[in-house]
């Protein structure tokens, strides 16, 4: 059944699920089923759902996901009718999620699902500071090409200097956060790269945790260094503008 983007997830029923895992995918036919099964194995013992959002793949990703659902009945598949990018795919998954806590990871299999439970526990631990809304992964040993690591290092340094968001690896797709906090953030293309800054803009606290990173086993990267640079400056200026225009009431009292 097709639902308009504007009406999607309106009236979503509450749930007792402990976690919703949101995975954006685009042309990941070879590794899609294996990643879904690996996520399910990592979350054994939890009440969870896996939401894969297909960003209009041109290969057999959707067919592979439908076949995987026979082994992983907790898998839900959403499909965009047009490719609207990774950030919109993540947002679709969060909107449709039933749990109050969301974990995101990239669909290429380079993020390790085994890290998800640890990041979730860090978010909900009894001594967590008030206002903690996100625990973001930081890749310890990058398994990318030297050129990609170099470009990422430069971009992260520039972003840190301008946004002061505390993130040394904002490109890591593995994050755990409260759904309600995410839905308070301004939505725009490529926002997934600026989530720590946007969370802090809203007044939330963000913590970082080291996570594993793996070589890509299937497919090819959907981004190039030049492609990232083409939009990075405009995105960065936009987030700086949002930060400059933010105003906080400090506290709210019901009288």
Image: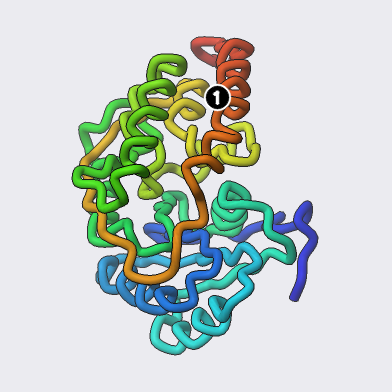
**Residue 122: x percent and y percent?**
24, 42
- Residue 116's spot in the image, x, y percent? 29, 55
Residue ID at (57%, 64%): 53
Mark count: 1
Residue 46 appears left or right of 194: left
Q: Nearer the viewer, residue 9 or 199?
A: 199
> What residue is shown at x 22% (from left), y 37% (from top)?
126
Q: Quadrant of residue 13?
A: bottom right
Q: Position of residue 195 (x, y in %)?
A: 47, 35
Say above or below: 144 vs 225: below
Q: Quadrant of residue 133?
A: top left
**Seen in the image, is 188 located left or right of residue 53?**
right
Residue at 53% in and 72% down? 76
Along the line of sight, the residue nearer the viewer: 83 or 199: 83
Q: Nearer the viewer, residue 239 or 50?
A: 239
Location of the N terminus by quadrant is bottom right
- In the rendered image, is residue 147 in sight? yes
Residue 139 found in image quarter: top left
Percent x, y for residue 4? 79, 60
SS of the residue under disc 1: helix
Q: How is the image coloured?
A: rainbow
Q: Is residue 159 above or below residue 78?
A: above
Quarter placement of the C terminus: top right
Q: Residue at x 68, y 64 (%)?
A: 80
Q: Which residue is mark 1?
A: 236
Residue 131 in sight in this render: no
Question: In the picture shown, does residue 60 fall above or below 40?
Answer: below
């Amino acid at each position: 059944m097709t639902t308009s983007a504007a009406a999607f997830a309106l009236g979503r029923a509450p749930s007792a699920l402990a976690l919703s895992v949101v995975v954006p995918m685009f042309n990941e036919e070879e590794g899609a089923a294996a990643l879904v099964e690996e996520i399910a194995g990592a979350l054994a013992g939890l009440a969870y759902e896996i939401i894969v959002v297909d960003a209009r793949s041109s290969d057999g990703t959707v067919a592979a996901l439908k076949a995987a659902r026979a082994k992983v009945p907790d898998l839900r598949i959403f499909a965009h009718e047009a490719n609207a990018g990774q950030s919109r795919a993540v947002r679709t998954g969060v909107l449709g999620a039933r749990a109050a806590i969301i974990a995101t990871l990239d669909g290429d299999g380079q993020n390790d699902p085994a890290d998800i439970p640890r990041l979730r526990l860090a978010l909900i631990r009894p001594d967590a500071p008030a206002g903690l809304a996100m625990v973001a992964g930081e890749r310890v040993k990058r398994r990318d090409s030297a050129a990609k690591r170099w470009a990422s290092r430069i971009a992260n340094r520039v972003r840190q200097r301008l946004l002061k968001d505390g993130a040394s690896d904002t490109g890591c797709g593995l994050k755990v956060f409260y759904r309600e906090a995410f839905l308070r953030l301004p939505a725009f293309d490529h926002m997934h790269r600026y989530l720590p800054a946007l969370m802090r803009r809203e007044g939330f606290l963000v913590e970082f945790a080291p996570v594993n990173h793996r070589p890509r086993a299937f497919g090819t990267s959907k981004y190039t260094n030049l492609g990232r640079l083409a939009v990075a400056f405009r995105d960065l200026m936009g987030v700086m503008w949002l930060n400059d225009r933010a105003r906080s009431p400090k506290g709210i009292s019901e009288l």
